[in-house]
Image (tube, rainbow, N blue to C red):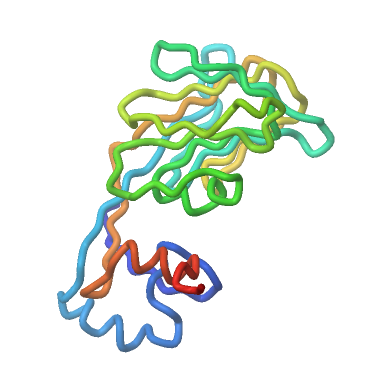
Amino acid sequence: YGTPLVGINKGRLGFITDISIDQYREALAPILAGDFEMEQRSMLEGGVQRDGHQIFAGVALNDVVVSRGATAAMVELRVDVGEQFVANMRADGVIVSTPTGSTAYALSAGGPIMHPGIAGWLVLPIASHTLSNRPIVLPDDAEVRLTIVAGRDASVNFDMQSLASLLHGDCITVRRSAHKVCFLHPRGWSYYATLRRKLRWYEG
């Protein structure tokens, strides 16, 4: 909707919440007065196709995650980018992440950190059955398709929007959204300073 967002951190990590809860009054005053740094970040959108019909649609700032069922050993997914076949991945799941999401679930799964200025997606398997299936960074101008080949009770999550009990042949499509998220940061904000602080890179 184009509404600017200001991230206030009430938890512990929070890479997009750069104002701590105990400093929000001091930080918000100049922002509300118009003194801020504005940043726009890309989003994902897509859905689930079954037998030629879309049965689910969602958007995501962080990631789209296809996961195995609670009792299943793993899920096998066919990965296509645009009109090109990439690979079949057998894993606990696959993450398609924005640069913003690269410091969320994807980071815990062993993916790289992507600068939010990069026009790309990160695709990585979760606990891959084949060690050679590595994370890959893709340009964000092509649609990514994940098709369920094998596995029971797989689910898909567009951030917190979920669809469970995917069937064999269901196709999850992911593409760049026409919309972006607008963040307002305090003057002097730095992405690299955020990484240093959140990841404690300054500790020897």
Above-or-below relation of 141 to 1? above
Above-or-below relation of 169 to 13? above
Instruction: Give percent across and percent down for residue 11.
Output: 55, 73
Drawn side of residue 103 relative to residue 51, left or right? left
Residue closest to the far right: 71
Instruction: Give percent across and percent down for residue 166.
Output: 67, 27
Q: Nearer the viewer, residue 109 or 181?
A: 109
Would you identify the image quadrant in which residue 171 lies?
top right
Instruction: Give percent across and percent down for residue 7.
Output: 38, 69
Drawn side of residue 187 relative to residue 192, left or right? left
| Residue name at image x 64 percent, y 37 percent | 126
Residue closest to the far front: 204
Above-or-below relation of 188 to 108? below
Above-or-below relation of 81 to 26? above
| Residue name at image x 17 percent, y 80 percent | 33
Q: Nearer the viewer, residue 183 or 203?
A: 203
| Residue name at image x 60 percent, y 41 percent | 162
